[in-house]
Image: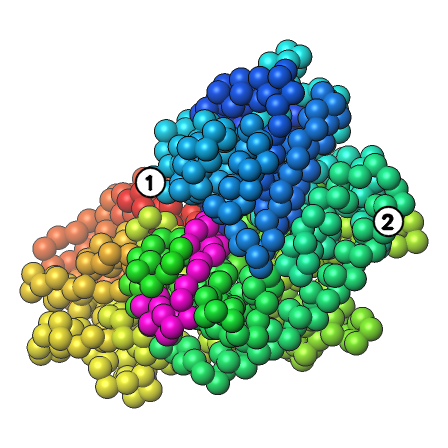
Amino acid sequence: MRKKWYLRREIEINRIEDLPPLLLQILGNRGITEEKEIRKFLYGKIEDLNDPFLMKDMEKAVERINRAIDNKERVIVFGDYDADGISATALIIRYFRDTYNYKMDYYLPDRQKDGYGLNREVVQEFCRKKYDLLLTVDCGITAVEEIAFARENGLDVIVTDHHQPADNLPPALALIDPLQKEDSYPDKYLAGVGVALKLCQAVEFKRSGKYISEKLGRLFDIAALGTVADIVPLKGENRIITRKGLELINDTGNPGLKELIRRTGLNNKEIGTGHIAYIIAPHLNAAGRMSTPDLCLELLLTDDHEKAAEIAEELVIINRARQELQDRILGEAIEMVESEMDLEVEKGIVLASRNWNHGVIGIVASKLVELYHRPAVLIAVAEDGTGKGSCRSINGLDIYQALSKCSGHLESFGGHKMAAGLTIDGDRIADFRVDFNRILDELLDRDDLIPVLELDSIIETADISMELYRYISLLEPFGTGNHRPRFLLKNVGIKDAYPVGRDKRHLKFFLEDGLAGISFNCSDSLNGFLTEKLDLAFHLELNEWNGTESLQIILEDFNIASRTAYYPLEYRSEDFILLDKRGCRDIPAYLKNIYNKEQRAAIYINNFSLYHELKREIGSQVYLAGEAGIENKLKYNGGSIFFFTPNLLEEMEKTGSEYHINDLVFLSLPFSLEEMKRYIDFFVFEKLRIHLLYSRRDALINKEIIQRKIPSTDFLRHLYIFLKRVSSRKILLEKIHTLFSDYGKIPCNQEILKKGLDIFEELGLLEKEEHSISLLPGPVEKLDLSSSISYNKSVNIIKSYNCFVDLAMREDLYQLLDKLKSI
């Protein structure tokens, strides 16, 4: 699927000593702009974690837990069946066991039997067993009825969660969730295990006076595991937790984690966030999806190496079965999409089956989002007709909000902006599908269904160095909210390329300057690489081979700017979007794409022949400004294109009419920045898309036009020589053009001749009378042309035009965007 490319430039940061501008730009793109904040992001340590008591209800929670410890009360921890919930449970159990020799019991819900979160039957069992305190991790914030029932039956409840609270909060003794409206805690996007860690920090402080003890510090590997697995933004505290945890994971003292690393082939490797997200966490999640999550919790809690090895091996087997089941369901889902859905009509995928495992459909939904780039809801229908669904979203759509708008069809739902779960009666799925897509029609445009690749900066191959790589490494760990910096090389040639890998699916290539790169799952694009100049979107990687280190680019996407099939590069501001398609070879096809979207577009041209050439190829509703009745044609025709020239725009201005457009296309290059801004300001729009289709050839043509109107020093020299030759007599003004043209030394027109004579008059070289001129005695010293106002104006016109061309033709167009906004 083709992607739109968006060059980010969130904010410019002032220079900071010892940090290069490119690194500062990347940080600015992530919203990190102040020097203190930047240094904390780059060099932050666990000492920089926030005070846990800034979190609402933390004092109450700690007081109750300390009372339970001192009185040896019975406490049960209720967790969740995913990697975050399992990690949060393990962290709590291990911390209190290892630090205070205090044993807490635990309960992880069975995905198939219990579903997500607390349920009344489980709470009833806790009450029957006479527990004094229930502590939830990674859940509980929406369990209003269940917690009310617990309190009525004498069971105190402390909730630690990171999910979105509803308007009605549960009556727990303490609610610890940074997303509560009245909670001012600075880090809002902790994982469930992160919130659990903050609780442990607070308990530690009350009991020892330190926020991080040695024993609590050893648990950061578990905290990092859950943080990365839950795909929370790796900023703020999540970044500090993950960085510290990765240090520990690479030499972990946790027997279970050590064995799982070994069994998954990661021993002797430098483990990073990618290894956790795509290898370790899926093994933990697999047990919750296919079997029981208790197995994973036992793995993280045991100190017995033999037992850890047995559990790790069992998890590898379970994960393999999960992969096979996932592949089967994915195949069925794709077949259903292709055969049962019209993706031109339905913006969201809603599928259901009685043959699907509820534990796996969330992964499959994510795969469908990757394939089709649209929200996906997969529902596994049980024998009793109840459907359990997993929802995944795309950027630009809050899936939780979308579900809330059609919640009348649902028995229950909950989740985040990007992921959610639901329960629905099987008989209502068809109606839900219709209503869900109706909501998506309100919330999404068709363009929202095109995937976007965000780029951090345009660079040159000469910028790629080990020094650059070392600075980029300061941004690690990478993950959600802090992806690897993605760069753009423009208009580069490929010297050599060949398929590699066991099944030859990957492509090894070399740029013309010798820089190596690799593109995964891209060998079928071999011909495109060798025959065209390309724009490459990539990140950098250090390649180590036989003790030698070298940099290579990891290709994420490529673009052939000259082809219409590839989307233009986007630059965004509050008022408009610049779409860079300079050098496009098939102008008619590009304009036809705009026309087919049924938008109103204005196209700037500087000659009428372009209009007549293009009108035949675009469509019927294509007009020329100034045509009779054009205002009505544009008003009543939904999709219309009209061409205008500078002179025609002046005629449009005289009508006093408003021209509403969605797209403004610069097919030709204007003659100045002010002229370009004038055209933008003339039209009425909400968010204007400005398409740049001009080329460097247009810039050269414009320069020739300007130069034909401005006397050069060469022209002035020839004109002065001519005047000296005829200086013995007065020359009639009406004859001078003919005489000078006959002189034949340099091309001449009336306009340029008049300006030349004006310059000589200002310099005191000639005298004008009513109908004639006379040459005056020449200067004794060398003539200074800058003494002439008219000459200076001519020079400034050329200088101004050259500056404008530099802005209009440079690779990075943000400076052009800034200038357009500032005038």
Name the quadrant of the C terminus.
top left
**Residue 48 location, x and y as percent?**
61, 23
- Relative placement, left or right, of 406 versus 554 is left
Q: Is residue 428 magenta?
A: yes
Magenta-colored span:
413-437
At horizontal 13% and vertical 75% (from top left) the residue drawn is: 636
How packed mark 2 is, by other alpha carbons closer than 10 Å (few <14, some 14-19, many 20 or more), is many
Q: Is residue 247 magenta?
A: no
Q: Amino acid at mark 1?
A: Asp
**Residue 178 location, x and y as percent?**
46, 33
- Relative placement, left or right, of 682 versus 424 is left
Tell me the residue that label 2 is attached to. Answer: 309
Q: Is residue 486 above or below residue 182?
A: below
Camera-side residue of 383 and 244: 383
Inspect this view and state whether residue 197 appears: no
Q: Residue furthest bottom?
A: 616
